[in-house]
Amino acid sequence: MAQTGHMCAREAWVSLCAFAVVLAVLPLHSIAGSDEETVVTFDQAKSGTLPDLFRTMSSSDEEAGTWTVQHIDGRPVLSQTTIGDRGYRLAALKDMRIEHFRAGVRLRVGKGDEAAGLAWRVQDAENYYAVRLDINDHELIVYKFVGGNRVRLERLERLRLERDQWHEILVEHVGERLRVWLNDIPVASERDNSLHSPGALAFWLPGDSTAHFERLWYEQVDRD
């Protein structure tokens, strides 16, 4: 199984090949303090269904959206295709508890508000961290949600973000040290450990957005 690099330069987008299985455990490539890398893709998933690996949730009284496997640009992806009015929607990995980690997601926004991202240390629909890539406003924002209250930790504006392109977000959160990369460019560095309990990773987007998620990968990292 061939593995590509995690990111590309901000202005030089690359097309990454799909992985051969829905859930694969791959050997780590020389990152100290880590065990192994897990990659989640949708090559073996049935089109039009939500894989059993995921549970969906919403922060509002609306439904969690319509999450199904589709083929976009010839790739099997997990898509959320229903535009709602408010709140946030998540598709979280079931039975997952991770605290100190490095994780990445490859995504493309769809119709609606044109924003999507990755959530982590997810306890429920109201308690987690998230990074938001907003194509419409050309910005990236790091949030934490505590009891449903949204707190902005960092915001990067005036990014060059192309519509109808795939983007990769990488997050590393070890202890209170939080770092984010976008397409191989470091874009955010923050310190926060308010939500220190282990939790799930999740695809994330606002209720009025749609998006396609090609893959998710993660690895546990030992705290220094």
Image: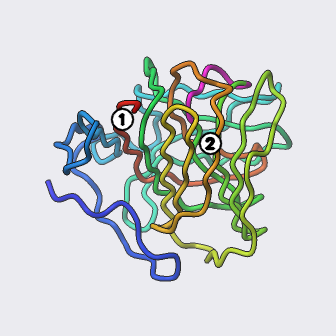
**Three-letter residue code for mark 2:** Trp
> Which quadrant of the rendered structure holds the C terminus?
top left
Q: Quadrant of residue 73?
A: bottom left
Q: Nearer the viewer, residue 72 or 159?
A: 159
Q: Are marks 1 and 2 in contact (CB under 8 Å)?
A: no
**Residue at position x 43%, y 22% in the image:** 96
Residue 85 percent location from the top left of the image: 85, 43
Give the residues in magenta: 120-126
Task: Tell me what residue is drawn at x 65 percent, y 58 percent.
Answer: 133
- Three-letter residue code for mark 1: Val
- For residue 178, which quarter of the picture? top right
Residue at point 28%, 36% (across, down): 33
Toward the viewer: 184 or 165? Answer: 184
Q: Element type at marker 1? A: strand
The residue wearing badge 2 is 204
Please determine whether, in this image, residue 145 is positioned above or below residue 45.
Answer: above
Horizontally, is 180 left or right of 30 in the view? right
Find disc 1 in the rendering and name its residue.
221
| Residue 155 vertical placement versus 62 (above, below) | below
Number of residues whose C-alpha sits closer than 10 Å to that of mark 1, classed few (under 14), some (14–19) or many (20 or more): many
The numbered mark at residue 173 is none
Tell me, yes or no, whether the highlighted magenta stretch contains residue 133: no
Q: Position of residue 88 (x, y in %)?
A: 74, 38
Q: Position of residue 15 (x, y in %)?
A: 37, 72
Most extreme residue toward the front, as rendered?
Answer: 224
Q: 137 or 29: which is nearer to us?
A: 29
